[in-house]
Amino acid sequence: MTEGNESRIDRETVVTRDFPLELEGEALDAALAVLRDTAGVLKAAPRDGGRRGLHLVYDTRRITASGILSRLEAAGVAPPQRRLARWRLSLIDMLDGNVRDNASHRAACCSRPPPGAGRR
């Protein structure tokens, strides 16, 4: 993504995640190509340290982990089969939803009650 687009993104919704996917060779290159063209993905690279998977930086207002996984499946990348990897990816998706929801939350001030307060 270009630097101009990156400056318009709200920094509180940008997350950095490691996706534990079994990718090597051509499958890794195809996954990186798909993700680099995906709206909301700011950075896509292989994981460091010789571990299999992807290191991603993305904006949760535009895409979440489940959206990334569905894009990868559409590109022919198989979802992980190991139970721990599936659990970790579902946890990442839940955290992405929490980040997105918290960013859109409007907090109540001490002098202004929250919406619906005082109604019976």
Image: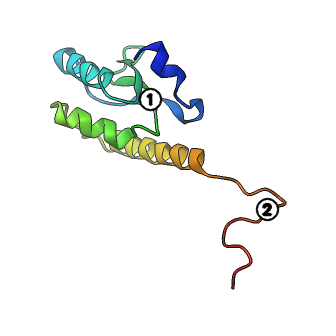
Q: Which residue is mark 2?
A: 112
The residue drawn where x is 58% and y is 44% is 103
Q: Residue at x 46, y 21 (%)?
A: 5
Residue 94's place in the image compared with 115, above or below, is above
Residue 15: give its label.
none
Q: Secondary structure at mark 2?
A: loop
Type of the residue with mark 2: Arg
> Does the rendering let one see residue 77?
yes
Between residue 108 and residue 18, name the one nearer to us: 108
Q: Is residue 32 above or below residue 118?
A: above
Q: Residues within 10 Å of mark 1 (few under 14, many from 20)?
A: many
Q: Residue at x 54, y 21 (%)?
A: 7
Mark 1 highlights which residue? 58
Expressed as whole percent of the image width and height from the top left, the position of residue 68 reads 32, 35
Q: Amino acid at mark 1?
A: Tyr
Quadrant (top left/top right/bottom left/bottom right) for the N terminus: top left
Q: How many marks?
A: 2
Say above or below: 10 vs 6: below
93 lies left or right of 104: left
Residue 27 falls in image quadrant: top left
Label 2: few (<14), some or many (≥20) within 10 Å?
few
CA gap between label 2 and label 1 equals: 34 Å
Residue in front for this viewpoint, 42 or 76: 42
Q: Earlier in the sequence, mark 2 or mark 1?
A: 1
Residue 80 is at least partly visible in this image: no
Q: Nearer the viewer, residue 96 or 113?
A: 113
Quadrant of the frame with the C terminus = bottom right
